[in-house]
Structure formats: structure tokens, C-alpha cells
Image (tube, helix red, strand yellow):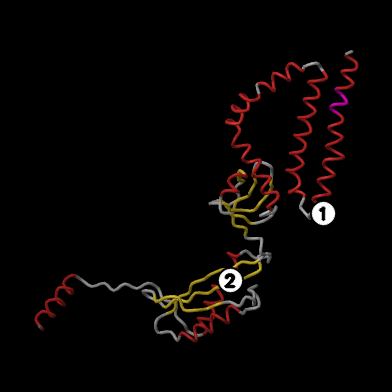
Amino acid sequence: MYVYQIIYSIVAIVVPWFVKKFISDRAIDKVAAKLRLEEYAAKPIKKMFTVIIYIIAFFFLLGIWGMRGTLTGLLAGAGFAGIVIGLAVRGVVSDLLSGVIIFFDCPFKIGDALVVGDVGGQVLDIGMRSVKIRSWDGVYVTIPNSKICSEVLKNYTHYNRRRLEINVGVDYETDLEIARKAISKALQREDLPILKDPEPLVFLDKLAGSSIDFKILFWFQYDIPMSFFNLKGRLIQAIVEEFRKQKITIPFPQVTISSREEAELAISTGQNDR
């Protein structure tokens, strides 16, 4: 009697492993290849099917060893237990369902530069419950999938290009057309990977307290071997060099200070004139 139960138990363990390894995983790989999905995207689905297969195998084992009463008791108590467990793991379930949504939506992939809420960095791994990110300052961050689905998500790698903005102020005595040409010349330098299409924009922005400010908008390819911080610094350096050639002054904040006595004298003088 026990010999048959042992044999059946081995079969109940081996068959699910065989189904998982040679049927489920291969079927998911074929579907992923047909849909042109990355390996990381298929991994959560494989895990989910693996859990389902082994849960079914577990119930078969209970039946093989004559634990139908236990199984019936488990099913009878499933209502109350389901409520308790549901309250305990509702966050986990929410993350798992969000993982499925991320799988079908595919808003990002491993290696993308991502910002979720106030956390930004490079995606390291996409799991069923969470996404792992290396933040800009080198910190390993785990973000629950439910948070990713509920927060505003910015993917800086998706379109493979970014727009940067720089503000440059010139002295009020400056010839604005000469300043505009100097900025345009800096934008056209060959050592700066700035895209010609869309064309960079240079326009007057505002009259500040000590300067007339230009706003510069330009696009660059995101996969270039230069960070946007470095590119921004290189462009500022190029603009300063062109300004120096044209003897254009970049002003610093100026404040006119007068003593209280001088102010009172000016007021009294104005009254005497009347």
C-alpha cells in the first residue's frame, strides 16, 4: 500500500517539474519570442505559472496520502482564512497584480533611466513584486510594483533623446544680436553632440535686475558617451569662450546702497524745491 503511495508521490513531484521545465517555460519563451519581449519580462510570468503548478501538485499529494479530510477542512476554512490572509497580504497581492500590468504594459526595460515619484536611477531588475533601481547617487533601491503603477513615471531612455535648457544673462549695454550669434556659434561646435534636428532655439527670456537673459533650448542623443551634466557644462564653457571673443560681459548682481542721511537729505531737498 505504502509502496504505491510513494510511487504516486514521486510521480506527483516529478510530473509538475517536467511540466514546468519542458512545457510551461518553453511555451512562455515561444510567446515572448513571438511578441519580441525581453527575458526579464517573461521571468515574472514563469514564476507565476510555477507557483500554480506546484500548488496543484500539493493538493494531489494530500489526496494520495488519504488526507482528504484535511483537504476538506482546509477548503471549508478557506473562507475565514481567506479573509485573514487577504488582510495580511493585500499589499503583496497588489504588487503581484501590478507586476502583471507592468509585464503587459512594458513602460520600461532593464538599463533604462527611470524616475518614479522622487526616486530616480537605472533599472537593474524587474520582478513580480518589485523593481530594483540603482539611484543616481549609487544607492540600491527597491520600489514595489504597486507604487510604480500609481506614481507618475518618467522614462528618460525611451525616446533616446533629451532636451536641455540653459539660461544666459548679458549686460544691458550688450548688442543683443551679436550675443545671439555668439550663442548660436557655440551651439554649432563639432565637439558638442547637439542635434541639428530639432534645431536649437535661442530667444530673449526676461529683463532681470542686472542682466538681459537669453533662454537656450537644445536636444541631444541620450546614448552618446557623455552625460547631460557634462554636456551642459561643456556648452556653458563654449558660450563663455565666444562671449570673450566678442568682449560680451556676463554681469553679476549689483545693489546700490545709500546711507540714511543721504536719503533724508534727498527727501528734504525735494520738499524745499516745492
Q: What residue type is labelled 1?
A: Lys
Q: Which amino acid does label 2 sit on?
A: Arg
Residue that protrudes farthest toward the top in the picture: 1
Location of the N terminus (image quadrant): top right
Residue on which the image places disc 2: 234
Q: How far across and down, in percent of the image, does residue 72 sit?
A: 72, 19
Tell which of 169 and 50 is nearer to you. 50
Tell which of 33 and 164 is nearer to you. 33
Residue on which the image places disc 1: 34
What residue is rendered at 87% in x and 19% in y?
6
Does residue 97 appear left or right of residue 40 in this picture?
Answer: left
Tell which of 260 and 131 is nearer to you. 131
Q: Magenta segment, which residues?
A: 9-13
For the residues labelled 1 and 2, the Cα–Cα distance comes to 44 Å
Decide whether residue 42 is among the magenta residues: no
Question: Dot 2, crowdedness within 10 Å: few (<14), some or many (≥20)?
Answer: some
What residue is rendered at 84% in x and 49% in y?
30
Q: How far across and down, in percent of the image, does residue 114 sit?
A: 62, 55
Q: What element carries label 2?
A: helix
Q: Is mark 1 on a helix, strand or loop?
A: helix
Q: How far across and down, in percent of the image, does residue 58 sit?
A: 78, 26
- The correct choice, above or below, for 50 with respect to 105 in the image is above
- Secondary structure that dominates the magenta span: helix
Location of the C terminus (image quadrant): bottom left
